[in-house]
Amino acid sequence: MSETTATGRSNRLDRRAFLRGAGGTALLGITGCSTFRAPRVAGDPVPPSPAASNLMSGGDFAYYSAMYAARPEELFPLPAIPIERIDPVFYRRLVDDPTGERPGTVVVDTDNHFLYLTQENGKALRYGVGLGRAGFEWDGRGVIQYKRPWPRWTPPDEMVARQPELEPYSIANGGMDPGLTNPLGARALYIFQNGRDTLYRIHGSPEWWTIGKSVSSGCVRMLNQDVIDLYNRVVDGTPILVTGLGAAAYPPLSA
């Protein structure tokens, strides 16, 4: 299961390491892309990002507002993302590629909450992502085996046993219907390694306030508008590397 990269790092999805580090039940929380919702209540909105406020009067803000506008044409119409409340460093943008991977590779930088789709000429598309909580980190090489629009979410039986309120969405009951409240969002990309399902997904999320944070229990979550963009750019079999690029890879806003 282990594979060594050009940097000499051993990359693997080692479930035994999770069990050693977080106790025998930790892995069960990872499967199925369950989520731990960030605390938010009506009337207590996330304040505007200071960096985003600096863009509000410029053309850049109009550009990104259009990028994250409502998508009424979707099967389940998506609302606009309030980008003024998100740090602009996590907006989708073309940047210099810090990964060293060949073009057409998806790289998830777990240190800095970015996902890169590498391009020709040393460039990459960079997206902000939300990642797993402390204790549920993972890394490795694999492929995006397949992808699905508006997927069903099916929590594994072990999760349902611990959270009986999920019984209506169990495997036996066919999972949760797609929609705006489905944990997998508007699109899901399914990660396999050595022909086996890792149970990890790249997927959309309506919880825009979690981008750039570690609040979910294992999977890579994106703004729905971003996961649609990524979905349209990758094909089945796309290689993926999930790793940490270190603090030095965190770019300035002008990147």
Image (spheres, rainbow, N blue to C red):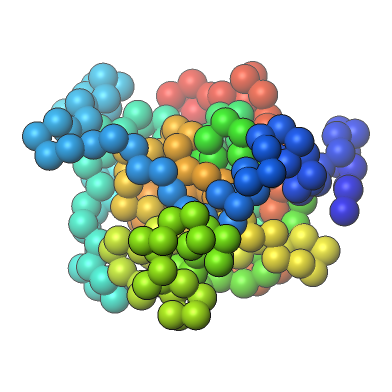
Q: Which residue is drawn at 49% across and 80% down?
A: 172
Apparent side of residue 106 relative to residue 59 in the rendered image (left or right): right
* Residue occupying image coordinates x 51% and y 61%: 161
Measuring from the top left, give residue 183's x and y in whole percent: 40, 58
- Quadrant of residue 233 within the rendered picture: bottom right
Rendered position, 32 above or below 7: below
- Quarter of the image for residue 38 reads top left
> Is residue 112 placed above or below 147 in the rendered structure?
above
Residue that protrudes farthest toward the left in the picture: 43
Which residue is more in the foreground, 64 or 112? 112
The residue positioned 22% from the left and 52% from the top of the image is 80
Report the front residue among 69 and 160: 160
Comparing 132 with 187, the one in front is 132
Number of marks in the rendered image: 0
Camera-nearest residue between 220 and 216 = 216
Q: In the image, 193: left or right of 205?
A: right
Image position, residue 242 (x, y; %): 68, 44
**Residue drawn 48% across the image and 34% down it:** 214
Image location (x, y in percent) of residue 197? 70, 65
Q: Locate residue 69, reporting x and y percent.
A: 23, 53
Compared to residue 27, the image places residue 44 above or below, namely above
The answer, for residue 99, to whether it is visible in the render is no
Is residue 43 visible from the viewing direction of this image? yes
